[in-house]
Amino acid sequence: MTLKTPSCLPLALLFLALAACSPPAPEAAVDTVLGADEDRRIELEKRRDQVEADRATIGPFRLISSRYRHQAQESGWQRPMLDLVLENGTRLSVARFTVLLTLSSPGRKEPWLRQEFLVNMKNTLAPGQRHETTLTPSPDSEWGLLQAPTDARMRVDVMSVRTPEGETYLGPGAFTPQDAVELVRLNAAR
């Protein structure tokens, strides 16, 4: 007498063998999430500590004035113009800096726009010097398409400065109030 085995039996055995070799999915997923939270917590703590350590060094790198405007182009587009005047009150020569520009209106909970800009200097900005620059986002960017009300104000936060030697210092804008809240939450979850 010959036994007939269903043709799907070898496939089922292969599936069971592979499943037995794999780690349980829920534990692996939990470990991945916990690892990501721990990595994020460590990243936030390092950034907070560096901002504190760099505060005295780059605190005097400050904004003198800022203005958000549009300039008519021959093509008919309105080109957004973000005018900044900064003063290097630090002891450092600055080769580039990063600023976070936030456009908001009084009474409006969410800002109209928020974006980081990296400004590379043609010549280094020596201690005590002022620098005037105009950032010109593309006319078809959010900055160009936005028709913000006349009461809109532009806030400028210095995120970082970099010296010609490549040393980077973090400004107060590099560790936001939202980062602080997230760090408290991550520490509480430990």
Image: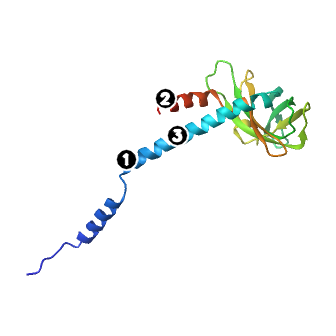
| Residue at numbered disc 2 | 188
Disc 1 residue type (three-letter)? Pro
Residue at x 68% of width, y 19% of height: 106
| Residue at numbered disc 1 | 26
On screen, residue 30 versus residue 150, left or right, reads left
- Residue 78 in the image: state x and y as whole percent: 79, 37
Disc 3 residue type (three-letter)? Glu
On screen, residue 35 versus residue 123, left or right, reads left
Residue 50 visible (yes or no): yes
> Label 2 vs label 3: CA separation?
12 Å
Label 2 crowd bin: few (<14), some (14–19), many (20+), radius 10 Å: few
On screen, residue 45 versus residue 62, left or right, reads left
- Marks 3, 1: nearer the viewer: 3
> Label 2 vs label 1: CA separation?
23 Å
Disc 2 residue type (three-letter)? Ala
- Residue 72 in the image: state x and y as whole percent: 83, 36
Looking at this rendering, what residue extends furthest in the left direction?
1
> Label 3 vs label 1: CA separation?
18 Å
- Marks 2, 1: nearer the viewer: 2
